[in-house]
Amino acid sequence: MSFIIKHKPITFNDVVISDKNVCLQLRNWLATKSQEPLILYGPSGTGKSSIAKLLPYAMYADFDAFDLQWIIADGRNNLAGQLNDLKAFCGVNSLSFSNNRFVVIDEIDNLKPEVQRNLKGYIDQYSGVVHFVFTTNFLNKIDKAIQSRCRKMKISHSNMSAWLPRLKHIMKLEGYANIATDAELLNIASKANGDCRSALRKIEDLVVSLEGANIRKSYITSAPSSSRTMHSK
Ligand SMILES: Nc1ncnc2c1ncn2[C@@H]1O[C@H](COP(=O)(O)OP(=O)(O)OP(=O)(O)O)[C@@H](O)[C@H]1O
Ligand SMILES: [Mg+2]
């Protein structure tokens, strides 16, 4: 299984966000159980969809998947139908009576302009009842009126030093704790140019090469420290 899937964040705390301000804002949004709609925007592979998936569970310890409406705006679907689903999910006749509901529209820039304009009304009507979270790579394609109603958070490429603890954790889970030095891991990750998917692929390649070299955990733990770096195969 690809490391991108195998080592995807399981909790909000697993998500690497190096921008301290964004981190604080997100934590505040969670702590205050804010009903202010959120737009997570930024380049590809920075964790926007992952964050959107994990926010409900970070806000409500007993969050039920049934209370999440996840809409992928791919521009081909019957989006009017999707908005009707949204109405059914948010409205008084909803099957769920919970006030802890989330609506996520992933890649919201794919919604056609007229659908975005309709969405504006839904946000006004339901943002006190459900939490809206939108993700996009292209903030400039989002209707200004929607932007005006949302708290915008830019999820940028994390600097790779922020990734180090997570990379070390992944190496440990793979049975290769301590085989690569911090500098070596950072060097590998820095070649990913901030794209987290790419960083995970590079770590996967490293593990594959270690497997190929048949360097086993038992060997590593018994080997003298000088032979524990990945250059010592
Ligand atoms: N900040 C992060 N912390 C931990 N893992 C991450 C992070 N960003 C990305 N990943 C890894 O990359 C995978 C893809 O991330 P995700 O789909 O959330 O990115 P995205 O920002 O939504 O990308 P896109 O803009 O292309 O939709 C995740 O499943 C996870 O394995
Ligand atoms: Mg995404």
Image (spheres, helix red, strand yellow):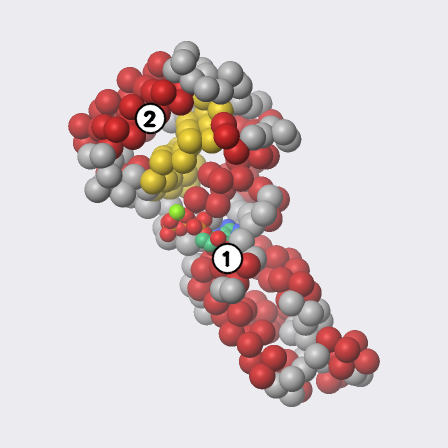
Instruction: Give the tally of numbered discs.
Output: 2
Q: Residues within 10 Å of mark 2 (few under 14, many from 20)?
A: some
Vertical position of residue 181 compared to residue 114: above or below: below
Task: Say left or right for 164 vs 46.
Answer: right
- Viewer-side label of 1, 2: 2
Q: Position of residue 76 (x, y in %)?
A: 21, 42
> Dot 1: what SS?
helix
Q: Residues within 10 Å of mark 1 (few under 14, many from 20)?
A: few
Task: Say left or right for 201 vs 61.
Answer: left
Looking at the rendering, which quadrant does residue 137 occupy? top left
Task: Say left or right for 146 vs 232.
Answer: left
Task: Say left or right for 24 vs 229.
Answer: left
* Of the pair 147 and 14, the residue shown nearer to us: 14
View extreme (front): residue: 95
Identity of the amino acid at label 1?
A: Ile
Vertical position of residue 19 compared to residue 144: above or below: below
The residue pinned by badge 1 equals 5
Quarter of the image where the C terminus is located? bottom right
User: Residue at 67% across / 82% down in the picture?
Assistant: 215
The residue pinned by badge 2 equals 85
Q: Position of residue 156 (x, y in %)?
A: 43, 48
Compare marks 1 and 2 and give the one earlier in the sequence: 1
Q: Does the residue tagged 1 have its C-beta within 8 Å of any atom of ligand 1?
A: yes
User: Residue at 65% across / 74% down in the picture?
Assistant: 180
Q: Position of residue 112 (x, y in %)?
A: 20, 34
User: Residue at 49% across / 24% down in the picture?
Assistant: 101
Identity of the amino acid at label 2?
A: Asp
